[in-house]
Amino acid sequence: MAGTSYGRRVSVPDISGMAPGRHAGASMPSAEVRAADDDLPRSPVAAPVLEMHGIDKRFGGVHALRGAELTVQRPGVVHGLLGQNGSGKSTLLGILSGQLRPDNGTILLGGTRTVFRSPLDALRSGIAMVVQETAIAKDLSVSENILLGRRLVRSPTGINWRRTHAKALEYLHLLGLDYDPRWPASKLRPDERQLVEIARALSMNARILILDEPTSSLTEDEVVHLFSAVQKLMQQGVSVIFVSHRIADLYSLGHEFTVLRDGKTVAQGPFVSIEPEKLVELMVGRKVASPQPKRANMRASSAPALALQGISVPGVLTSTDLEVGQGEIVGLAGLIGAGRSELLEAIFGIRPVGDGVLSVNGEPYKPGVPEEAIKRGIGYLPPDRKTQGLVLVRSVKENVMQVSTLGRSRLARPNRGEESRVVSQTMSALNIHAESPDVPVNTLSGGNQQKVALGKWLVAEPKVLLLDEPTRGVDVAAKQEIHEHLRRVARGGTALLVSSSETPELLALCDRVVVMFRGRVMGSLIGQQATEASVARLAGGEG
Amino acid sequence: MFLLVALFAYFSAAYPDTFLTSTNIMNMLTAVSVLWVLAMGMTFVLLTGGADLSVGAIAAIAGILLAKLLGAGLPGGLALILTVVVCGILGGMINGVLIGRLRLSFFLVTLASMTALTGVVYLWTDTQALVVTAPVATQIAIDKIAGVQTPIWIMLATLLVAMYVQARTYFGRDVYAVGGSLTAARLAGIRTSATLVAVYGVSGACAGLAGAIAVGRIGSATPTVDHAVALDAIAAVLLGGTSLFGGTGGVGGTALGVLFIGVLLNGLSIAGVASHWQGVVTGVILVAAVLLGERGIAGGGLGRTWRRLTRHPPNASS
């Protein structure tokens, strides 16, 4: 089928390549989606489910949308919305969900012109949105979260819990979920909570569900879980507008797409009609260099930059051995619970190590507190930039200089000239877009924020840099820029250890991929051996 | 900023003879000198996302300590310095260590230390006031240097030192980082526990200085603790634009906040408003000022302009 062949040409992960039977209960997305496509009856000129024409929106001097268009033809399709940060995606969705009023343009639902005066209007018209920040009350039960407020089943004596839970269970079943509706939401994993939000949308009779970056913090198996829920939605005739930076996901799940750039719709159509590279080109507006081939030779060096022997963390990691040479980029692959993040945390000193020996450049090193790790030349980019990697309310300059100035006396005065030089060098090297180095980091887009978080470590010139999900929630162009810079840094002699849930990222970036499963290193793949399939096999526990 | 000027202008226009005299202005400033010093230290604590409820008790202890040291014959200057340092250590070691190293809630810890230290005050004084006659007392609170009363010089000095530390030292940056995101600061290698111990130490030291000034003004160390001053200081800091959650704000704004309160209280008493009503009016105006500040209707909000000037002097190359 056309869809899967595009999957092979560019490193788009082919989920169907995973061993069958592994994810019992979750259907294989690609094959079935195409089949559904052909099966839908040709309805005689029914009005499209949703049409947005000529949408204009200004925010003061910023022209966020200039005549944007979006059309969802039939019910039960997955419509991918693509666009870089700043393309107007969030604004368009804000208008569709009733949070913003367009300056111009029309919205038609089923052929009827509609105006939303508030998000409630949009909800009543059947449009629901699930965003990245989970809107779940952790201490309430799953049922309460689904049937929030008025919709709990009442009887003359008050809330009828039995019937409420039964009703919630209905919606959970519709999505193929088996959670006990009486559980407090805090008992569920973040990805499961997201599914509860989708169940809530269903319970409000949503006909159009907007999913805004639902996969950016999910592991591969959680993604598959989400996809099967989305397919159930399709079966109910719900149309899903799916926003994602992960092109591969969109190809395996989506039917049609709309690409926004600079506030305009530059392309629309079915996914089968376009190749991924062309799609990315349309998003970015220029030809984007394809990922560079992995470097074949390694710089020979005396001692490995980082060496682990028998490192264990009680309950999480069993005797782990690992080596990263100077200038080498080693990837860590594996499912959730495999222990990747925990390994990085242990090396950096924020997770207590049980047994084992570590050395940096041949010298023994005992992990203690972050400050010590940094003194030994180890840097760590945490997976969550908002709560761990950056101090959001402070300026770009302060964030960038944070680590490199650690050694100085606390009563010393920062050298303004030196700092502005270093910061502007960093900003241009990483192509960070910000009004000035003095603006708070929370005014930057996700990709730029991540670059600041990374820049902070690069300024400190570590010998070993540990990275956990370095391009999570980052748009395609920024992702490429970050990868390119990481390669440059490695060429300069820094050893990189990169953990990522995106196998294609590891395959494109790393010289070697180490795969973990349940706290153990299963194997190390180099060169030709390193493929999606081989990584997936080891990640799943097969020898 | 705008509101402060407006308020000042109003009172000047309404009561030119009594309000706008140099004597009155100086009195107005010295009246808030204690609050000012307390608020300077409190700013640092609030910047880390905490608050120090025990400053009233520490100030009281400072007064008693000073009185006792002077009574024991120590020279004025030495006694003063010792008092401030001891209070700083007190604040840092008790509040700072419990909050910074043991990671206990600032609210619980400073509330507990306030209670405990209040008890110490009663025990130590046997509920007797201690009259202080040593010259240093009047020197610090009443005398004038170059025509301006000493407390005002102290206010200026503390402001300048605080502004320097906040904007021109790595410690200042650490304070803002810890307040902005404790986790991110720790992961970047910043010694967050040391920073927290230090800010509560600073707050304690400021409380010590404030207590000394108070003793000077009254002439004796009273065996009572004014618990309200802590909240007054917090109010002044928040009025000045520092966020309750930490990470943004600064002593420049706090200065404006204290001045605002000073002008308000002074103006109200000149206007003949009964002292009980003063409390009500002050409360209402505080809320109004913070609201207007948030919404920016007053054109940038109290303290925001000042903060921009004091925290980020223009770069040579931006």
Image (cartoon, coloured by chain):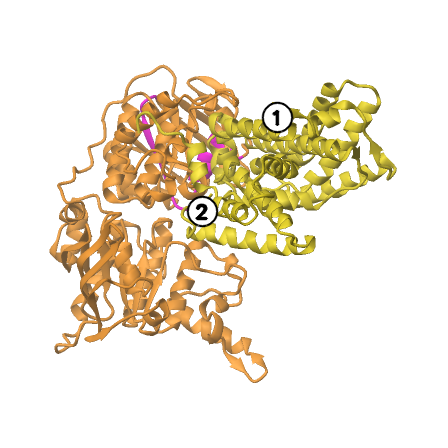
Chain colours: A orange, B yellow
Q: Give the residue at mark 2.
A: B301
Amino acid at pointer 1: Gly
Q: Does the magenta portion include A337?
A: yes
Q: Residue A243: x percent and y percent?
A: 27, 55
How far apart are the alpha carbons under marks 2 and 1?
33 Å
Looking at the rendered structure, whether the residues under marks 2 and 1 are on a common chain is answered as yes
Question: Which quadrant, please, contains the N terminus of chain A?
Answer: bottom left
Question: Which quadrant, please, contains the C terminus of chain A?
Answer: top left
Disc nearest the viewer among 2 and 1: 1
Q: Does the magenta portion include A468?
A: no
Left or right of B198 in this view: A52: left
Q: Residue A140: x percent and y percent?
A: 53, 64
Figure quadrant of residue A520: top left
Answer whether residue A153 is visible to the viewer in this image: yes
Left or right of B37 in this view: A383: left
The foreground one among A21 and A64 is A64
Q: Which mark is residue B147?
A: 1
Which chain is indicated by disc 2?
Answer: B
Q: Residue A271: x percent and y percent?
A: 16, 57
Q: Do the residues bearing badges 2 and 1 touch, measured as CB atoms within 8 Å?
A: no
The foreground one among B32 and A305 is B32
Which chain is indicated by disc 1?
Answer: B
Local secondary structure at mark 1: loop
* Range covered by the magenta-colored residues: A326-351
Q: Residue at x 26, y 26 (%)?
A: A488
Q: Which mark is residue A7?
A: none
The foreground one among A517 and A304 is A304
| Above or below, comparing residue A178 to residue A372 in the picture | below
